[in-house]
Image: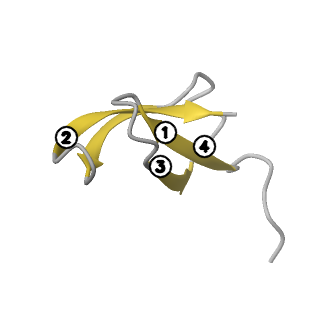
Amino acid sequence: MARSEIRPVVTLRSTAGTGRSYVTRKNRRNTPDRLELRKFDSAAGQHVLFRETR
């Protein structure tokens, strides 16, 4: 099964400045803008905003 260009792999980087990141996939048709999710940052010890990097 080939990788789809519609659902690319994206990296979510922490805005807390700790350097932590998550890797996920997103649907480009539904969310063409950069993805922003609140997730747990283990270095900061709390939930912070993670933004998509390119």
Which image quadrant is residue 33 in?
top right
Cβ atoms at labels 1 and 2 below 8 Å apart: no
Q: Residue at x 39, y 28 (%)?
A: 15
Q: Identify the amino acid type marked 1.
A: Arg
Cβ atoms at labels 4 and 1 below 8 Å apart: no
Which image quadrant is residue 17 in?
top left
Q: Say whether residue 49 is visible.
A: yes
Q: Identify the amino acid type marked 3.
A: Ser
Q: Residue at x 43, y 48 (%)?
A: 20
Secondary structure at numbered mark 4: loop
Label 4 packing within 10 angstroms: few (<14), some (14-19), many (20+): few
* Residue 21's disc number: 3
Quadrant in which the C terminus is drawn: top right
Question: For mark 2, what is the residue?
Answer: 47
Gap between marks 3 and 1, in whole Å? Answer: 4 Å
Label 2 packing within 10 angstroms: few (<14), some (14-19), many (20+): some
Q: Is residue 21 above or below residue 36?
A: below
Position in image of residue 29 (x %, y %): 65, 34
Q: Identify the amino acid type marked 4.
A: Asn
Q: Residue at x 23, y 43 (%)?
A: 44
Gap between marks 1 and 2, in whole Å? Answer: 13 Å
Secondary structure at numbered mark 1: strand
Cβ atoms at labels 4 and 3 below 8 Å apart: no
Secondary structure at numbered mark 3: strand
Instruction: Indicate which label's residue lies in the foreground, 4 or 1.
Output: 1
Q: Identify the amino acid type marked 2.
A: His
Label 1 packing within 10 angstroms: few (<14), some (14-19), many (20+): many
Position in image of residue 52 (x %, y %): 55, 33
Question: For mark 4, what is the residue?
Answer: 27
